[in-house]
């Protein structure tokens, strides 16, 4: 892993360790509801991703860089497909697993610690890949 | 990363997502400023088209959503300022200021035309 990415992942992990209550209050104040947003993908955009991720082919969706599970949980809920969520900071993945579980999505979702440079999946596994501000 | 995406996608599969990126043809000084104001790797993705072509995708659609991105940044900032005492108490001064600097930097970068955000859709044939 190149040092810059290591720094980025460490910084992300520190953000995911912050108290969820404070974050939820902030989110409600900013956007009127708390869905687990901690970046820039608002609910309308998450709904757009869910709609657009309905590919012509069958198969699960890969949520690349899931963070704390937003907008992955909404995509799993709307798209009615299995969803595999990956990211590097484990602390974020624990929140993601809780977010899926809280919405009865545990049976259709899987959370895996991995970065996007070497995906631990067989070729031609997924019908679509969603990401939010990962390629920057 | 996009090449890996291509590998694990079925033919006909889609990559859909939002990316923060810079406009084409920034000067080196502007690139440095964009990196300071925006995400650390922002200057690696100045051309979604080029990245997508290199990774072997097709059917690229890029929709500029920078205006909405600006509204989102502004909403975060306004809420952070309203809740500042509570957030400083719960997050700590350092984390609060770090988060505030990040959001303010993003807003400056947008306003100076150094940062864009786009919805990018492409397909694996």
Image (cartoon, coloured by chain):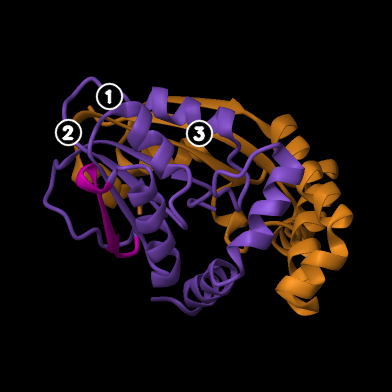
Tell me the SS state at disc 3.
helix
Give x and y (percent) for residue A27: 68, 48
* Mark 3–mark 2 distance (CA, rounded to whole Å): 20 Å
Q: Is residue A90 above or below residue A57?
A: below
Magenta stretch, residue numbers: A106-115
In the picture, residue A31 is in which quadrant? top right
The answer to whether residue A11 is above or below residue A97 is below
Q: Is residue A62 left or right of residue B47?
A: left
**Chain A drawing hue:** purple
Q: Which residue is mark 3?
A: A46
For the point 88% across and 53% down, the residue is B82
- Which residue does the numbered mark 1 point to in the structure image? A55
Q: Are marks 1 and 3 in contact (CB under 8 Å)?
A: no
Looking at the image, tell me whether mark 1 or mark 3 is earlier in sequence order. 3
Q: Are marks 3 and 2 on the same chain?
A: yes
Instruction: Please give the residue where the numbered disc 2 appears in the rendered image.
Output: A59
Quadrant in which residue A117 is drawn: bottom left
Chain containing mark 1 = A
Q: Is residue A73 visible?
A: yes
Nearer the observer, A8 or A69: A69
Separation of disc 1 and disc 2 at Cα? 9 Å
Q: Are marks 1 and 2 in contact (CB under 8 Å)?
A: yes
Parent chain of label 2: A
Question: Element at badge 1?
Answer: loop
The tint of chain B in the picture is orange
Q: How far across and how far down the image is residue A64, in percent?
A: 37, 50
Queried whether the magenta region covers residue B110, the answer comes back as no
Label 3 chain ID: A
């Amino acid at each position: 892993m190149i040092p810059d990415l290591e720094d980025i992942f460490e910084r992300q992990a520190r953000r995911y360790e912050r108290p969820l209550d404070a974050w939820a209050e902030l989110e409600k104040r900013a956007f009127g509801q708390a869905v687990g947003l901690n970046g820039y993908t608002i609910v309308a955009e998450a709904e757009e991703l869910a709609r657009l991720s309905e590919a012509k082919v069958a198969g699960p969706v890969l949520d690349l860089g899931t963070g704390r599970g937003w907008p992955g949980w909404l995509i799993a809920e709307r798209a009615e497909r299995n969803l595999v969520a990956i990211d590097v900071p484990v602390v974020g993945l624990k929140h993601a697993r809780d977010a899926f579980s809280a919405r009865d999505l545990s049976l259709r979702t899987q959370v895996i610690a991995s970065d996007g440079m070497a995906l631990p999946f067989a070729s031609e596994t997924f019908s679509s890949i969603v990401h939010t501000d990962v390629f920057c | 990363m996009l090449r890996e995406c291509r590998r694990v996608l079925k033919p006909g599969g889609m990559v859909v997502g939002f990316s923060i990126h810079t406009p084409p043809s920034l000067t080196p000084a502007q690139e440095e400023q964009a990196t300071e104001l925006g995400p650390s790797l922002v200057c690696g993705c100045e051309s979604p088209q080029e990245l997508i072509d290199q990774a072997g995708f097709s059917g690229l659609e890029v929709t500029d959503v920078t205006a909405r991105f600006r509204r989102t940044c502004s909403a975060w900032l306004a809420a952070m300022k309203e809740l500042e005492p509570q957030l400083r108490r719960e997050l700590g001064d350092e984390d609060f200021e770090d988060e505030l600097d990040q959001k303010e930097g993003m807003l400056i970068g947008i306003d100076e035309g150094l940062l864009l955000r786009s919805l990018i859709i492409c397909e694996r044939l």
